[in-house]
Image (tube, rainbow, N blue to C red):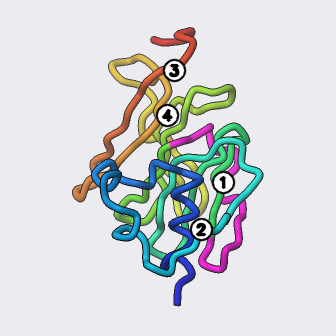
Amino acid sequence: MNRFASAPWASFILLATDLIPLAAASVPADELLAPNAKLEKVAGELRFSEGPAWHPDGYLLFEDIPRNRIMKLDAAGNVTVFREPSGHSNGLAFDKERRLVAAEGNSTGGGRRISRTEKDGKVVTLADRYNGKRLNSPNDLAIDAVGRIYFTDPRYGSQEGVE
């Protein structure tokens, strides 16, 4: 049985609260989790983690944003670095071809772009400008059934460099 069947999802609810859809916030925990689910810490020493994305091959990717890396949690519970540097990415999703799409932020060393990690590991830019101006700080993203990518582009804190 896949170890993600119950407990690790409960763990990630603690580590990355954006895993709980807004609609689920009012659903009692016993309806979201298996009755025998136990909280389990699956990753530690993360400075700030967000952007979880589940891959159909059975692993979870998530961010360690300040450390500029994307982490991988496999079915055996091993946590390894998937991509470093990550462009200080936050939002992650997989496209129909199972390639990683990332919203790279504006932190020092941030990409200020939407990137895709090809299956061979090469990182390509999908978007870094709109109407000739650089993106602010791509944050979250979603990919629809057709393959269109939707993303947010806020600028938190300093407005320096906003085009």
The residue pinned by badge 1 equals 83
Amino acid carrying mark 4 in the image? Arg
In depth, the one of 140 and 104 nearer the eye is: 140
Tag count in the figure?
A: 4
Camera-nearest label, 2 or 1: 2
- Mark with earlier residue (3, 2): 2
Camera-nearest label, 3 or 2: 2
In depth, the one of 113 and 31 nearer the eye is: 31
Which residue is found at the position 46% from the left and 30% from the top? 128
- Mark with earlier residue (2, 4): 2
Q: CA distance from mark 2 to mark 4?
A: 35 Å
Which residue is found at the position 54% from the left and 51% from the top? 16
Query: From which residue to which does the magenta span run?
Result: 74-90
Q: Which mark is residue 156?
A: 3
Q: Which mark is residue 39?
A: 2
Amino acid carrying mark 1 in the image? Arg
Residue 161 in which image quadrant: top right
